[in-house]
């Protein structure tokens, strides 16, 4: 069987994208490349449902570069920050705050459980100025209630930074309506292109913060990305090839009906998978799921989830996504992002059924 990848990134790419990736890399200080960058900016703003005066910053670096830069360029030691931490990516925001010695409070969510109103409103009227959240906490697949978080932030006049790296194109999102100030995504998740590019969408408030920032970073000082970006350029050599893939991918999404159609497509794959696994010895792990990924717990606690991941990889040439740490043997995940067809989902279901028949799963 040819390789199938159901991880949460890098994911499978369409033939059209792979063709772009196979081309030579053009020189980029040209009008043609600037046009590509400006086109990407316009389409991404449209897909985030950003305000007209929002800007896109294209970073060469994985998603974490954008998390790091978003925090370090818009927040400082005068901010009082809330961090929603429900897994590895929430923990990463905590570590970024620690790195910059920022004043933060962690709201710990149990792994696989969403943030409750009670947990959040404990911090109401306490002069918090910023909030950091991973819309989909990819390590558990929990999708936080962004509308609730948005209402809380509007009420408390809190600057809201959303890591939408795995949620973008999977779950509906309206930056303007939610009053989100910064939203982030990355290339190797639902954008389904090569890793190497991360994207920050900054609204007017965020742009002001970036321009007034005293960030101590040379490469990730976002001011120069904003000024260079005005003419469709970046301060340094970007991952030109991946940016061209991005342009191709955005045009494909556009010609297939735009962002809402893409969210619908991924949401259908997720629903289809979740329906099909009902007859298998799994439990859904998260209490509120993103369409990007389904975390599964094995009903039989004597079977190792990591072992299942390995058998599927070694014997069927198919990748599901293992978990780490204390959940290594309990949970694995199945992604619904990338160039996945319904038949591919059926193949994965058949593999699970085969494992049951072989007595490996029960
Ligand atoms: C993938 C991911 C990231 C970024 O990870 P990188 O390995 O740096 O690309 C950040 N946040 C979330 C929620 C993610 O899913």
Image: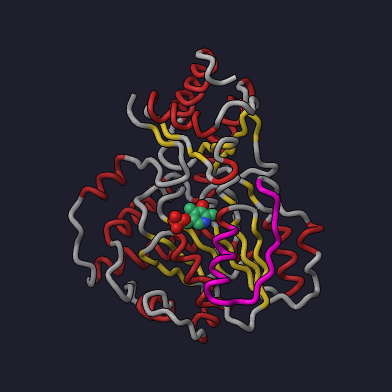
Image spot of residue 346 (x, y percent): 48, 24
Can residue 165 be seen in this snapshot? no
Asked if residue 309 is positioned above or below residue 88 in the image, the reply reads: above
Q: Quadrant of the N terminus?
A: top left
Residues drawn in magenta: 90-111
Residue situated furthest top in the rendering? 357
Residue 178 on the magenta span: no
Q: Quadrant of the C terminus?
A: top right
Asked if residue 356 is positioned above or below residue 16 in the image, the reply reads: above
Q: Is residue 256 left or right of residue 171?
A: left
Image spot of residue 139 (x, y percent): 56, 47
Viewer-proximal residue among 19 and 194: 194
Viewer-proximal residue among 178 and 152: 152
For the point 26% across and 49% down, the residue is: 20
For the point 19% across and 66% down, the residue is: 27
Q: Is residue 308 left or right of residue 281?
A: left
Asked if residue 335 is positioned above or below residue 278 in the image, the reply reads: below
Image spot of residue 59 (x, y percent): 39, 67
Number of residue marks: 0
Can residue 132 be seen in this snapshot? yes
């Amino acid at each position: 069987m040819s390789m199938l990848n159901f991880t949460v990134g890098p994911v499978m790419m369409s033939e059209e994208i792979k063709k772009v990736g196979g081309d030579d890399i053009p020189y980029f200080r040209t009008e043609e490349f600037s046009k590509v960058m400006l086109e990407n900016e316009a389409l991404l703003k449209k897909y985030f449902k950003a305000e007209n005066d929002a800007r896109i910053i294209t970073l060469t670096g994985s998603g974490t570069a954008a998390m790091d830069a978003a925090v370090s360029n818009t927040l400082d030691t005068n901010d009082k920050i809330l961090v929603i931490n429900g897994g590895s990516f929430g923990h990463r925001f905590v570590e970024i705050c620690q790195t910059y010695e920022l004043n933060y409070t962690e709201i710990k969510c149990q792994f696989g459980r969403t943030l409750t109103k009670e947990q959040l409103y404990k911090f109401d009227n306490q002069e918090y100025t910023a909030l950091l959240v991973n819309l989909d906490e990819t390590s558990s697949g929990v999708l936080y209630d962004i509308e609730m978080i948005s209402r809380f932030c509007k009420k408390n006049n809190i600057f809201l930074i959303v890591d939408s790296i795995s949620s973008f194109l999977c779950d509906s999102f309206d930056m303007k309506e939610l009053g989100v100030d910064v939203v982030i995504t990355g290339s190797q998740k639902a954008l389904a292109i090569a890793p190497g590019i991360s994207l920050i969408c900054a609204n007017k408030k965020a742009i002001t913060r970036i321009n007034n920032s005293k960030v101590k970073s040379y490469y990730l000082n976002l001011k120069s990305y904003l000024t260079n970006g005005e003419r469709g350029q970046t301060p340094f050599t970007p991952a030109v090839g991946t940016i061209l893939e991005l342009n191709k991918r955005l045009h494909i999404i556009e010609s297939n009906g735009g962002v809402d159609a893409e969210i619908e497509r991924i949401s259908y794959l997720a629903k289809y998978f979740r329906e099909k696994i009902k007859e298998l010895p799994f439990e859904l792990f998260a209490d509120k799921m993103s369409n990007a990924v389904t975390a599964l717990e094995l009903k039989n606690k004597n079977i190792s989830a990591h072992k299942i991941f390995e058998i599927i990889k070694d014997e069927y040439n198919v990748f599901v996504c293992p978990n780490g740490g204390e959940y290594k043997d309990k949970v694995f995940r199945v992604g619904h992002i990338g160039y996945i067809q319904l038949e591919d989902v059926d193949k994965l279901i058949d593999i699970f059924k085969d494992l049951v028949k072989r007595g490996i799963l029960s």
